[in-house]
Amino acid sequence: MTMVLVQPARLLLSTNCKFFNMNEIILLSITAASLGFVHTALGPDHYLPFIVLSKARNWSVPKTMWVTFIAGVGHVGGSVVIGLVGIALGISLNKLKFIEGFRGETVEWLLISFGLLYTIYGFYKFLKNGGHHHLPDFLMPKSIRQIKHQLNHGLEKKVDETKLTPWVLFIIFVFGPCEVLIPMLFIPAVQRSSVGIASVALFFGITTIATMMFIVYLAHLGSSFLIFKSKEKYMHLIAGLVILISGLGMHFFNW
């Protein structure tokens, strides 16, 4: 049993590229980078939550980029760690793919739950910011009626804005699997090329995170030219619905 565990572990410790020449490693790295780009660009869940939340919460460009970067590191890092541990322990590719599938189902429900909760929060903000003017009092939540009463008496209360949103996104993206990464890691692993493993992980990770940040940046930049002043009371509600739809799209349409 000891020999069974020790031998696969040498896959990560070996620095010998005996079976992989440099041209093959370069080709493998380019393939990993290409898959990272396609995997990210074709998955709206990789960037839509950051785009809509940055607009709804008035994040600056640096903060938006930082939140996207940290979430991207968590997204790629989770799969890299699982892949490397699996290779070191000699776990089969099918078992690792099962683990990634379970992580995929988990992140779908996390995204759906977060989208639903944020939609409810957005509806609350909509009512609080003027959406309730045309509703009769009996249709308003009790908290909204209280706020309306206080506003009428010049006693407006400040409502705390949560600081947890970036951390929620990070946790969700840590659970998000990179389905194409682990099979790519196994290609150099079976050849005992630690340089090949590192190259695949590095190029896939850099391309994935860079693509996320680039798309989010372009969308953030483009939205700055649009006038949302009259629509501000809808922004949290829209953000929640977009995130909810992203989660539902992952679950039902395998986005």
Image (cartoon, grey):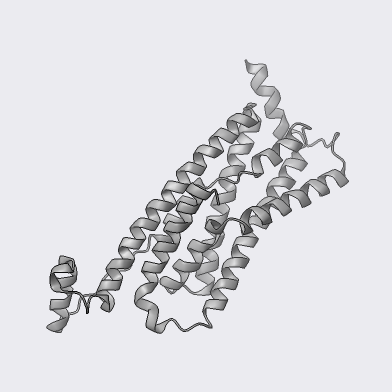
Q: Percent x, y for residue 213?
A: 60, 64
Where is 83 relative to 133, above or below? above
Residue at the extreme top of the image, as rendered: 1
Please identify the quadrant where the N terminus is shown: top right
* Residue closer to the observer: 203 or 219: 219
Q: Percent x, y for residue 73?
A: 57, 53
Report which quarter residue 99 is drawn in. top right
Residue at (55, 67) in percent of width and height:
65
Q: Percent x, y for residue 39?
A: 64, 52
Residue at (70, 51) in percent of width and height:
35
Left/right of residue 92 with respect to residue 78 in the rendered view: right
Residue 206 appearing in the image: no
* Residue closer to the observer: 150 or 206: 150
Residue 194 appearing in the image: yes
Where is 69 relative to 15, above or below? below
Left/right of residue 120 with respect to residue 180 in the rendered view: left
Report which quarter residue 245 is drawn in. bottom left
Where is 221 relative to 12, above or below? below
* Residue closer to the observer: 68 or 142: 142
* Residue closer to the observer: 246 or 176: 246
Q: Percent x, y for residue 117?
A: 34, 57
Where is 52 relative to 20, above or below? below
Left/right of residue 24 with respect to residue 139 in the rendered view: right
Residue at (68, 46) in percent of width and height:
201
| Tally of numbered tags | 0
